[in-house]
Image (tube, grey):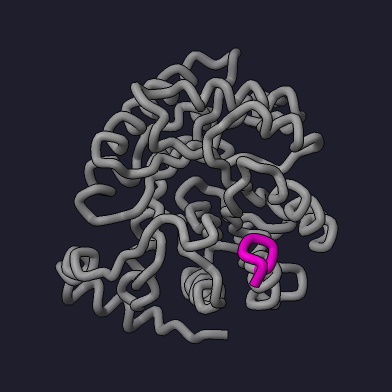
Amino acid sequence: MTQVDLGALSELRAREPGRVAQLWQQRERRDLLGRDGRLLLVAADHPARNALGVRGDDLAMADRADLLRRLLDALAVPGVDGVLGTPDVLEDLLLLGALEGRVVAGSMNRGGLQGGAFELDDRFTAYTPEAIGALGLDAGKTLTRVCLDDPSSVATLQATAEAVNSLAQQRITTIIEPFMTAWDDGRAVNLLDPESVIRSVGIASGLGTTSAFTWLKLPVVPDMERVLTATSLPTLLLGGDPTAEPEQTYALWRKALALPVARGLVIGRALLYPPDGDVTAAVRTAVEMVHGE
């Protein structure tokens, strides 16, 4: 596994904070899609939403050096197109030289902390659309949960629409991750039946004054054939909290990726924290599914 000197990284941050802005401006960029029109992103925006757990380990993602090692190993696999993250994680990777020639998507709304009574008041507390444009990021991502029994959902919808508008004006892609959500004994629970996902697709697709630069990021649920007839927008599939056996999960991803509007995967914990600990092997499997390599 790649080694990360957290002390050296912290020293660089303390002594040369201006290095971050300089490196963003110098970063080698690429087109969002490769020649095959597919995309594989590794997601690492979980910690900023208090979502650190993996398979029963509530603090699995808390060790920053370990998380960065896993991300560096994943990004080193040929066929991985880029990464999705919050400013802190992306800037660590930038300082480590790992974002050159990569697709970089910035996570925007992280205010709805997992487990909070205010979880569905999902304010935009990380990247702004303006910062994404100024820094040269390639996309902005928003989590858009809609709870019909929670009035705060309408604020998230409005903020998402404004983000879509701002990014579209800059000709930058917005990746919307929508869910229909319900409160269950004080917990916000995403509804993962096909009908609920279909409803979330319709709501998310209509946000903003144009959908020309809008992509969707959807969970893999039963009857994906029917789910993905609900949109013409380019769609990436997400991994979610890994609980099933890897081979079972991979089979579901393969089937969904064969559908016409599916463009690729955005996977985080399932690839970064596989049960056997072999990040490289898990990522190579994802690369083969997305790019056939």
Q: Where is residue 258? Give x, y as percent.
A: 72, 49
**Point 49% across, 86% down: residue:** 3
Does the image show residue 273? no
Q: Quadrant of residue 1?
A: bottom right
Seen from the viewer's position, the closer of residues 286 and 145 is 286
252 or 276: which is nearer to us? 252
Q: Can the viewer see residue 243?
A: yes
Give the total number of marks visible in the rendering: 0
Q: Position of residue 233 (x, y in %)?
A: 53, 35
Q: Residue at x 28, y 70 (%)?
A: 28
Q: Which span of residues is magenta-colored? A: 288-293
Classify residue 252 as left or right of residue 278.
Answer: right
The residue that appears at 77% across and 59% down in the rendered structure is 250
Task: Please check the rendered image and state whether residue 292 is part of the magenta-colored stretch, yes or no.
Answer: yes
Picture coordinates of residue 23 (x, y %)? 22, 70
Q: Identify the image quadrant of residue 158.
A: top left
Looking at the image, residue 79 lies above or below residue 249: below
Q: Is residue 81 above or below residue 156?
A: below
Q: Residue at x 44, y 82 (%)?
A: 4
Q: Residue 87: say if magenta.
A: no
Q: Give the side of residue 209 with respect to residue 77, left or right.
A: left
Screen quadrant of the C terminus: bottom right
Foreground of the two, 4 or 34: 34
- Is 274 rendered above or below residue 85? below
List the single residue furthest toward the front.
35
Q: Where residue 112 sits: x, y (%)?
A: 48, 35
Prevalent SS, magenta region? helix
